[in-house]
Image (tube, coloured by chain):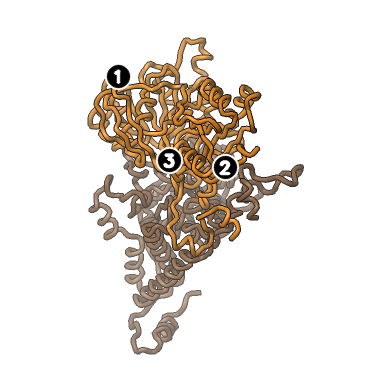
Chain colours: A brown, B orange
Amino acid sequence: MPLSSSAIRANLLLLRGGCGLFVSSRLASSAMLSTRPYKLHKLESGPASEAQVTSDEARKYYRDMATVRRMETAAGNLYKEKAIRGFCHLYSGQEACCVGMEAVLDRNDPVITAYRAHGWTYTRGVPVKAVLSELTGRASGCAKGKGGSMHMYNHNFYGGNGIVGAQVPLGAGIAFAQKYREDKRVCVTLYGDGAANQGQVFEAFNMAKLWDLPCIFVCENNKYGMGTAVERAAASTAYYTRGDYIPGLWVDAMDVITVREATRFAKDWCLSGKGPILLEMETYRYHGHSMSDPGTSYRTREEVQSMRQMRDPIASFRQTLLTAELVAEEELKEIDQSVRKEVDEAVQAAKTNAVPDPKELYTNVYSQPPSGQPNYRIRGIDQFTWSAN
Amino acid sequence: CRSLAARLGPVCLDAASFSRRRLSFGPQFVYTPESADKSLGETSRMNLFQAVTSALDNTLANDPSAVVFGEDVAFGGVFRCTVGLKDKYGKDRVFNTPLSEQGIVGFAIGHAVAGATTVAEIQFGDYIFPAFDQIANEASKYRYRSGNHFNCGSLTVRAPIGAVGHGALYHSQSPEGFFAHLPGIKVVIPRGPIQAKGLLLACINDPDPCFYFEPKILYRSAVEDVPVNGYVLPIGKAEVLIEGSDVTLIGYGTQVHVLREVARLAQSELGVSCELIDMRTILPFDEETVYASVCKTGRCLIAHEAPLTGGFGAELAASVQEHCFLNLEAPVRRVAGHDTPFPHIFENFYLPHQRRCLAAIKDLIGY
């Protein structure tokens, strides 16, 4: 419930612990913020051009984006220290996409995405500690340490998928299950600009449209498929039109409110029985494709820097909030500090928590041993490894 | 857990140990460089990926129909196998494809059927599965179904495979077992740079479609003096690397180097003389060399990273017992990856490392 401005001021005084500093400007409890323009494909009209945002919502979005940003930075540092090995694809720069979409979805709407999944894992309810522990292969990780960076899961979060594009038909299938059970939910199926050229994506589009599935296809277009710029990989880079018979929406995904309203529009579209819809979230990643890619051999440092300076989703949202007087600068600073503390503690846990039990090497291959073979063993486990159990 | 640690030797499982010691992951081996036949002429120091580049360079230079394509090959490739080729031969001969494995292989098959020498790259062997239909149903059957009217023999598909220490589920797989089951194609896996160049050129020149899998951990760690000119090594011919009398060890790719160490340990710790064979070609495999060796030693150990059930070792084991039955002193043993997905954790326990192989040799000797 939005607080009155005097209540906000009072709270700020309490937070300050009476050290004598307080914000003198009048803070609003909500504001109408404008969204950035959309582009439409086979749609008569699009999302709203402005939206009501309360100060509570503003704080939540800011906090979530700041947490994802700091978590990804921490993951990058852990990787450089070799506490994380293997593959690690960072989401920094794309925070507005997961936070903005999650603002409209609820935990009963399933989500499935590709490997750049840490941001989504967090917004889907996995604490930072469990994300970082999964990266460092600890038992406290959200997949017991068995999945790693690309395979994080939670209730109604179907991962985390390593093979490019493979998750899109899966998403269509999940949407079908929703429709079949009359769940009144949407399935959000994300993929990247590189995956947009995979054949199976189009197979999924066809099935989704044929059967009017409540599926929101989302192309997170960060302009580069690994090291290949979109123009060099795709005959058509208008990804929001590539669903052809599926209506589409192009979204400037560097602004969280713009993303939120697009998602609201898409969810309403699907739930009113109109079938699937395709959102192209045009965004940007600051880091390379993965930790083994510096990200500067196929784009200039100036380009990356200019995105950070001019179009950063967190900095621009911060500016919007201050200008609209929705949240005080001191509060934002405190959110930053509390996020930093949370992530630092998570990093410590990720470095020191227990490793998984050795039996995790061969558990969960099947649901249980075949019924006719009570002494079934996973073949190949030599006597040394097995007798440890 | 402590007794497990004791039995496994120096590998320790407690959390403190994990964070304290930077355990080295992946296949444990020391690469033993080999030298090329002097008759092949001038050599240059190359690692495995440079040997691949050299083979592709020779091909593009001598065969005007040859093209090389795949994801990211133009800048040099994610494993540097195609560095410099686009600049030297032009972007219509060395070019990038979009991210579409099924499309890449299907397109490559068509290009080969039309008569051009086609070298397609799949970025990781783990990603080859969308293309499996094209390989199984088109490439392998083209000659047979058309009564020799058409064929895609000028096709070679290259892909990196195998454990690398941190690849986890989708960057470590060894898919050769799936391909061994397709009559009509050839499957080749080199163990080092000199072998790599000769075998790749042999695949490119071979009149049948070839699938050439490069052990990715060897790209940088295997370095030799490789002949700069083109040369071919025989496809379908295994190689005896060490002669011995008590046990035949069979492997391919990275595992050959692990088995070298196993042979050394078997001699020093058990007094057992091992004969080591590198299969080099999985399909069609060299039956003669294998049977001759096992008939001589009477004991056979096959090792591969791919999972045990249905792995290529199963075919070798069945064939060996069929042809060498009366000479066998013990059942044929296989040491392989476990029947689980390639793990994100505990890779060291999953792989067919020296200690597991040595334990199998003890069983063979003591049978």
Query: Which residue is at 41% across, 52% downward?
Result: A89
- Disc 1 element: loop
Q: Which comes before the other along the chain, label 3 or label 2?
A: 3
Left or right: A11 with respect to B53?
right
Q: Is residue A324 positioned above or below A47 on the image?
A: below
Give how far across and how far down residue B146 sits, in percent: 51, 12
Query: Which residue is at 46% across, 36% downward?
Result: B256
Give how far across and how far down residue B187 sits, in percent: 47, 26
Left or right: B65 with respect to A6?
left
Residue identified by numbered label 2: A212
**Is the residue at mark 2 from the same chain as the one at mark 1?**
no
Residue identified by numbered label 1: B63
Chain of the residue that carries numbered disc 2 in the rendered image: A
- Marks 3 and 2 sit apart, C-alpha to C-alpha, by 21 Å
* Contact between labelled residues 2 and 3, with CB atoms less than 8 Å apart: no
Given this view, does label 2 or label 1 mark the residue nearer the observer?
Answer: 1
